[in-house]
Image: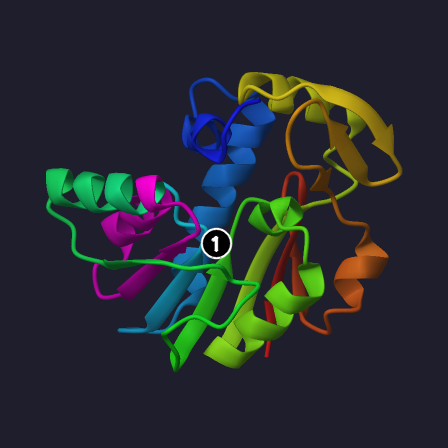
């Protein structure tokens, strides 16, 4: 069975994922850079190896970013990659479905359908709202259709066993959600359409 390290690391390998997925990734980062206020204190949920933190700091070096990841190996990789490119951020080990030892952020961000991999959606959303003044979540929606999704998951090392509505049932890995507009509307945020889904600002 593949580990989280085996899979998540490939989500940010932009030259290996389908072009529309790369476009979506780049769109989210560019949009986010315009949304965050100057010198904002930001928590990224699911920072993985730091690729998105580095991309954001390249255009917004004023930001004070903390990365949160559930895997110690990802925390270590993120720290190493930040040091390699001379960027500064805080990186901590933690699970967003449980209390984490940080608080009082201007923004909590959860990008590129990271939320779709987390089984306890309710706890994740509740804790993100508790940690930050505003929560920004980007997810895959109807534009992430069955054909694109299968190509994307194959590129990151996953095999889709079946598709049950908006649930992708995987062989030997966690199931992954995409999100309908109705679900995202229920978050009561400002929605911007992305190439594959929704960018939602809550709070």
In magenta segment, residue 52: yes
Place of residue 73 in the rendered image (x, y in percent of width and height, measured from the top left) = 32, 39
Q: Secondary structure at mark 1?
A: helix
* Residue 33 appearing in the image: yes
Place of residue 199 in the rendered image (x, y in percent of width and height, measured from the top left) = 61, 56
In the displayed structure, 174 sits above or below 75; it is: above
In the displayed structure, 81 sits above or below 169; it is: below
Q: What residue is drawn where x is 27% and y is 65%?
A: 63
**Residues in magenta, as a range:** 49-73
Q: What residue is drawn where x is 39% and y is 65%?
A: 43
- In the depicted view, which residue is nearer to us: 18 or 132? 132
Q: How is the image coloured?
A: rainbow
Question: Of all residues shown, which one is farthest toward the front?
Answer: 1
The reply, left or right, for residue 80 in relation to residue 52 is: left
* Residue 50 appearing in the image: no
In the displayed structure, 160 sits above or below 135; it is: above
Place of residue 160 in the rendered image (x, y in percent of width and height, measured from the top left) = 73, 22
In magenta segment, residue 154: no
The reply, left or right, for residue 178 in relation to residue 166 is: left
Q: What residue is drawn where x is 55% and y is 44%?
A: 112
In the displayed structure, 15 sits above or below 104; it is: above
Residue underneath mark 1: 31
Marks counted in the figure total 1
Residue 172's quadrant in the figure? top right
The reply, left or right, for residue 176 in relation to residue 60 is: right
Crowd around label 1: few <14 · some 14–19 · many ≥20 (10 Å): few
Place of residue 111 in the rendered image (x, y in percent of width and height, measured from the top left) = 52, 50
- In the depicted view, which residue is nearer to us: 180 or 95? 95
- In the depicted view, which residue is nearer to us: 76 or 14? 76
The reply, left or right, for residue 141 in relation to residue 73 is: right
Quadrant of the image for the N terminus?
A: top right
Quadrant of the image for the C terminus?
A: bottom right
């Amino acid at each position: 069975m593949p580990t989280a390290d085996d899979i998540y690391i490939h989500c940010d390998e932009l030259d290996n994922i389908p072009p529309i997925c790369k476009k979506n990734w780049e769109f989210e980062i560019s949009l986010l850079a315009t949304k965050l206020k100057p010198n904002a204190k930001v928590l990224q949920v699911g920072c993985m190896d730091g690729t998105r933190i580095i991309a954001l700091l390249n255009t917004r070096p004023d930001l004070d970013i903390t990365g949160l990841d559930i895997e110690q190996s990802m925390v270590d990789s993120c720290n190493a990659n930040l040091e390699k490119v001379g960027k500064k951020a805080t990186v901590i080990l933690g699970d967003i479905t449980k209390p984490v030892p940080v608080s009082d952020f201007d923004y909590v961000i959860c990008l590129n359908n990271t939320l779709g991999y987390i089984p306890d959606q309710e706890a994740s959303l509740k804790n993100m709202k508790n940690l930050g003044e505003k929560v920004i979540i980007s997810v895959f929606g109807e534009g992430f259709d069955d054909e694109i999704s299968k190509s994307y998951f194959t590129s990151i090392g996953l095999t889709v066993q079946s598709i049950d509505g908006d649930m992708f049932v995987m062989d030997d890995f966690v199931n992954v959600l995409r999100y309908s507009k109705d679900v995202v509307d229920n978050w009561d945020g400002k929605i911007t359409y992305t190439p594959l889904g929704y960018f939602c600002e809550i709070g």
